[in-house]
Image: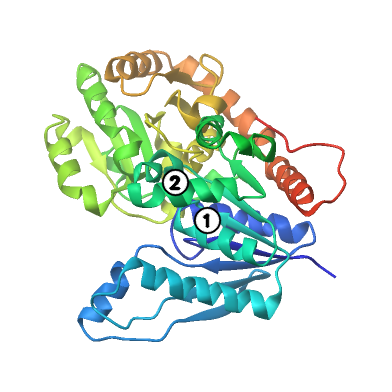
Amino acid sequence: MKLKVCITTLEFPPDVGGVGESVHRIAQMLIALGYEVHVAVFRAIFRTEREKAIVGEYRRAGHQTSSQNGITVHRLYPAIRSTIAKEQDYLSDLYDQLSILHRRYGFDLFHAFFINEMGFLTTLLAGENGIPAINSIRGADLHKHIFSPQQHGQIIWTLENSAWTTFVSRDLMKRARTLVPSITPRSSAFWNSIAPIQFDHLPTPAGIDRLQGTVIGSVGSFRDKKGIEYLLDACQELRDLDLTLLFVGDFVGKEADYWQQELQQSGMGDRLVVTGKISRAEALAYLPHIDIFTIPSIHDGCPNALLEAMLAAKAIVGTHVDAIGEILEDGVNGLVINPFSSKELAIALRQMIENPNLRQQFGFAARDKVMTQLAPSVEQQNWQQVYQQVLGVPQPLLPVHV
């Protein structure tokens, strides 16, 4: 009989987001390893519920179950009963829905992605039922949410009570082990993986005629952690060169006014191109048209955008943070600078702009690394060893650390 795994996550395709993509990829790996995989999807931000309550759209708590590529997907919903409901009302409903699923399916292991509310609910339910829980730290949960007085206690408790905790970078693991030293023997760090992409099969993106000179590009959902201010300042220092600064994606809504101000004050004028929100396929289609990929993040987990740029054999300038600074080797497969430094970023970009042969050399080296050390088979082996460790299956090796 197959062991039943329940993964809890805040997003899952068709939801857009890096966590959802990672969960889908890992779920497929677990199926290939012989597990029966369920994914419970729910959010810990209840803006939509409050909006519906205001206009009188009430509902009972519940969940919808479907099958998606061999994965049983459960989307959980809290009740909408009041315009003055608090977070604990919604979270209590979600816990109850997760409990209903466990009573029905009898899971052998829980695995939460994102450690604050998501991990807390999952680990609490697992502990009450004598089942192990794995928690996977992705980035913002320990880089930002740990500073929330309301969430700090839950995060610490969840770390303390996880059977195993995984991280996508050594920086994240170091922070968690500093907060809760007891997790050291039951935690590990390993990178995300990515499957090969056929870039020559992608259509030509719209607006390509707006790109002039050397194209410096960045891809993602741009927000505070991405260090975009430093990229704008660095490009101002390069205004003597013929270049276009390309942002593939859009700026998060809650920071829109701030970023609009930053873009207007950048002095880039028509040498600045922002695509706005587009699909992943459209975003990938821009990569072959970027000469230098920049990722000047101040913290960032293990971003898929970096791995996609490496697959596209792009010359990359990144920062010494999280998996970016672990995967990129300065002077080998890219240039790596300190975060928060427009000056270092400008120097690195100028070096890349003025040396096309160096760009090509770095790009080929980046592609070689991502195709070997960040291949799906490597990540699958890591997850296999973590699951065997947690479930008590004898194994000759501990999880692979990067």
Residue placed under numbered mark 2 in the picture: 141
Q: Which amino acid does label 1 sit on?
A: Gly
Q: How crowded is mark 2: few (under 14 residues within 10 Å), some or many (20 or more)?
A: many
Q: In which quarter of the image is residue 91?
A: bottom left
Does residue 382 appear anywhere in the picture? yes
Question: What x and y, as percent, mark residue 270?
Answer: 17, 36
- For the point 37% across and 29% down, the residue is 296
Specify the quadrant that holds the C terminus: top right
Question: What x and y, as percent, mark residue 100?
Answer: 59, 79
- For the point 49% across and 36% down, the residue is 306
Q: How far apart are labels 1 and 2 at the CA level?
A: 10 Å
- For the point 62% across and 50% down, the residue is 162
Q: In this view, does 147 lie to the left or right of 364?
A: left
Q: What element carries label 1?
A: helix
Mark 1 or mark 2: whose residue is earlier in sequence: 1
Which labelled disc corresponds to residue 119?
Answer: 1
Q: Is residue 186 above or below residue 239?
A: below
Question: What x and y, as percent, mark residue 94?
Answer: 47, 72
Specify the quadrant that holds the N terminus: bottom right
Q: Is residue 210 left or right of residue 75?
A: left
In contact (CB < 8 Å): disc 1 and disc 2: yes
Q: Which amino acid does label 2 sit on?
A: Asp
